[in-house]
Amino acid sequence: MKKELLTVDNMRNDLVSVFEYKSDTSSEKRLVYIVPFLLAAILVGILMKNPWPAIAILTVPVYHTVRFISEKREEKAQKIKMTDMLKNGELAVSEEVLSHIAEEEIYEPHLGRRRVRTTRTVTVFYFESGASWRMPEGYHYGWSKTYGMSSTGLENTSVAGNTFYYVTAKQSYGTAYIYNTKFFELKGFNVS
């Protein structure tokens, strides 16, 4: 099996995608509140001669519009900060031996700033050193010409005893990514 070369740029792009996944907010769901309440305010304003009920209804879409804009700005600022940090080379790479993979039910209060669906099942890779990696949903190694795979593919090709490159951003509050050494080779980077 031929190994593919793993570059620092590939690692940075994967870490940015993990960061984006972790900071995912459901601000788009605010649009569900904006449109109907805006239409209701217009309809009430047309049908009633008193403008105060329409103004009262209008407060809901105005609030959600302001929150939507502020959340999008915050997400953009966080992404720029993370990307800048990664461009400055703040990466740490270690070799870790996979102990086991487990599916766990986790509790995330206010997931996506909502109170609905606060628990979900995630796949966690555990390593013999005590390190762990929570696999984000989606497609992995999209930059790879040979080894791009889904979450299921990543889980199915990883067995206990495999050695992984465990890449972390030094100041990112746990943002990490893993690369199986049977698929990827890292050159020109200090591995601890």
Image (spheres, rainbow, N blue to C red):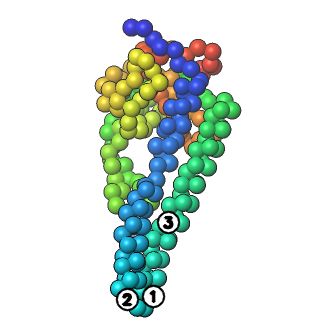
Name the residue carrying label 2: 48
Task: Return the mark for residue 93.
Answer: none
Image coordinates for residue 3, horizontal then vertical, percent: 45, 11
Quadrant in which residue 173 is drawn = top right
Image location of residue 157, percent across then percent down: 33, 22
Between residue 84 and residue 53, name the one nearer to us: 53
Alpha carbons under labels 1 and 3: distance apart: 21 Å
What residue is rendered at 47% in x and 67% in y?
64
Quadrant placement of the N terminus: top left
Mark closest to the chain's N terminus, 2 or 3: 2
* Disc 1: CA contacts within 10 A as few (<14), some (14-19) or many (>=20): some
Q: Which residue is mark 3?
A: 65
Q: Reading the chain from its start, which is encountered first: label 1 or label 3?
A: 1
Q: Pick out the residue farthest to the right.
A: 88
Q: Quadrant of residue 41?
A: bottom left
Picture coordinates of residue 26, whole percent (x, y): 43, 55
Residue farthest to the top, as pictured:
1
Can the viewer see residue 129 in this picture?
Answer: no
Contact, CB < 8 Å: mark 1 with mark 2? Answer: yes
Does residue 181 appear to the left or right of 120 in the view shown?
A: right
Three-letter amino acid code at disc 3? Answer: Thr
Q: Are marks 1 and 3 in contact (CB under 8 Å)?
A: no
Most foreground residue, 88 or 52: 52
Q: How many marks?
A: 3
Q: Which disc, if any, is residue 51?
A: 1
